[in-house]
Amino acid sequence: MKHTPKVLLIMGSVRTSRVCPRVTEWVAGIGRSCNDFNYEIIDLTDWPLPMDDEPGIPAMGSYLHTHTRAWSEKVASAEAVVFVTPQYNWGYPAVLKNALDHLYKEWRDKPAAIVSYGGHGGGKCSGQLRQVAEALEMRLVPTSPGITLSDDVIRHGASIDPDQDFVAHVEAIKQAFNELAVQVELANRA
Ligand SMILES: Cc1cc2nc3c(=O)[nH]c(=O)nc-3n(C[C@H](O)[C@H](O)[C@H](O)COP(=O)(O)O)c2cc1C
């Protein structure tokens, strides 16, 4: 039987008024148009991990808390991840760093892509996240699409229409998904 790789799309925002779910659904749709992988959206509000609450060093791989073990299983169950994250003050949200820092070996060699968004596409955020993903030795794809949000969305809470507003980013996102599929293939061969 044909194996269907599982990909987690991890949302970087947990704000109550966030646009992240809308952006991530749209990004997932592009993924589904590229291949028949199984795309699952991860909302970190469903994975409440108290800030840095593991007493041990995650790199040692021994987790005390049930929530960390569940998170470990969830990440380990996927063959790739896509971080869909806003830029906050030139960085990526603390909740995402905390979710990364709870684990270690689960990220290693994991094919990964970063899709950022913000007023200028969130390039500073994806740059910082790239550095961390490299430290974790993830198989990060070279293309990091950066979706531009309008001033109206950022300052006045205007609603977004991704099909219309983000059309200029579709090709870059497809490219990232295609690169991710190559990394999944390479990881499976390794
Ligand atoms: C704490 C905070 C910091 C922000 N910093 C930036 C920034 O550095 N650059 C930027 O382009 N937008 C920035 N923004 C605007 C966000 O891009 C915008 O609010 C976006 O909708 C956030 O994603 P979310 O709604 O999914 O949380 C910031 C927003 C917040 C809440």
Image: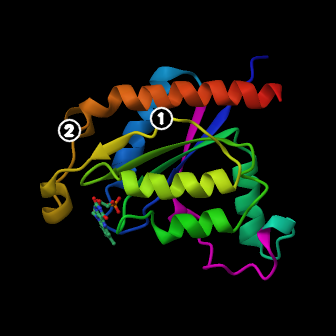
SS type, badge 1: loop
The residue identified by callout 2 is 165
- Residue 115 place in picture, x, y as percent: 44, 44
**Badge 2: how crowded within 10 Å, few (<14), some, or many (20+)?**
few
Identify which residue, 89 or 35, lies in the foreground: 89
Q: Quadrant of residue 29?
A: top left
- Residue 182 place in picture, x, y as percent: 63, 24
Q: Quadrant of residue 16?
A: bottom left
At horizontal 45% and vertical 22% (from top left) the residue drawn is 33
At horizontal 42% and vertical 64% (from top left) the residue drawn is 91
The residue identified by callout 1 is 143
Ligand 1's quadrant = bottom left
Q: Is residue 82 left or right of residue 187?
A: left
At horizontal 26% and vertical 51% (from top left) the residue drawn is 120
Stretch in magenta: 38-58
Amino acid type, mark 1:
Thr
Amino acid type, mark 2:
Asp
Identify which residue, 15 or 109, lies in the foreground: 109
Q: Quadrant of residue 183?
A: top right
- Residue 156 place in picture, x, y as percent: 13, 63
Q: Is residue 79 magenta?
A: no
Q: Is residue 54 magenta?
A: yes
Of circles 2 and 1, the one toward us is 1
